[in-house]
Amino acid sequence: MAIQGPSQGDDASELPPSFPPEPLNEADIRRPSPKDPIRNPRKDSDEESEDELQAEEPKASWLRNLLEFVAIIAVALLISVLIKTFVMQAYYVPSGSMEQTLQKGDRIAVNRTARDAEDINRGDIVVFVDPGGWLEDQPDTRNGLQRFSSDVFQAIGLLPQNSGHHLVKRVIGIGGDEVECCTDRGLLTVNGEPIEEDYLAPDIAPSLQEFSVEVPEDSLWVMGDNRSNSSDSRYHQLVDGNGFVPVDNVEGRVWSIFYPFSRFGGIPQTDSFDSVD
């Protein structure tokens, strides 16, 4: 069945009738007063948003500053730990056994890169871990908080390393050397060569006791510069029969004194062993 469209006489675009709005009552009409502020809805919305942003900005700024501060501290601590572990570490000299080169109370910087046998030479001053029985156990009188704080600051390198398990001495003989004392002039000899030790104070004898040793490979024969007041390789050879220090115990070579400031400076180099093969 076909669907018939409207006839030509019909108005296809005819719209439904519309009615004018009912007139408003005068009482319902409120005319603006000259005192009423002119309001811009869009402007009001923008001002409210700006106020909220300004209120949030100090919080965001404070948090950003805090995060930046924490990041800086973390990076500084990381750098300090890396330097302490691989490059340099500070130590405290606890006795006068190395006078006059080092004095009790000196803070010294130790080169941690010089720890292997090929990096250690005769005449070097080294810090090493007690090889066993060289140091007496000292009672720790600090409270728990002091010990914890000290251990933390030492671990990150902000305090000199506690020398309770470390010693500092001068290397006289390395692996394979024959070290003896003394010649008719009272001098040490290394591999038969007399040593004029320029780092000793004028009134200090090279040694008040005679000895003759051959240093094992990967070991050191060490002595303090204050020969009459140093429990070094000589003393421990007599006490326990082994005055040698394993190279593996070496923490590094002393590089400089950094405190007290009146003694600030590098460790003088010696040429006393230049003639030794």
Image (tube, grey):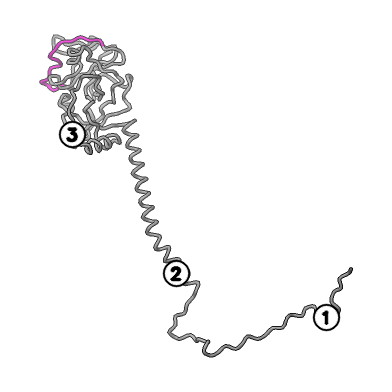
Mark carried by residue 47 = 2
Amino acid at the residue labelled 1: Asp
Give the residues drawn in magenta, as a range.
200-214
The secondary element bearing badge 1 is classed as loop
Foreground of the two, 84 or 103: 84
Give above or below for 245 relative to 147: above
Mark carried by residue 10 = 1
Residue at the far right in the pictured view: 1
- The secondary structure that dominates the magenta segment is loop
Foreground tag (3 vs 1): 1
Q: Going 26% across and 12% down the picture, which residue do you hit?
A: 215
Q: What is the x, y in percent for residue 197?
A: 18, 19
Quarter of the picture containing the C terminus is top left
Q: What is the x, y in percent for residue 39?
A: 47, 77
Residue 262 falls left or right of residue 120? left
Write down the quadrant of residue 34 in the picture.
Answer: bottom left
Residue at the far front in the pictured view: 1
Amino acid at the residue labelled 3: Arg
Write down the quadrant of residue 72 in the picture.
Answer: top left
Q: Residues within 10 Å of mark 2 (few under 14, many from 20)?
A: few
Q: Which residue is mark 3?
A: 263
Q: Going 47% across and 79% down the picture, which residue do you hit?
A: 38
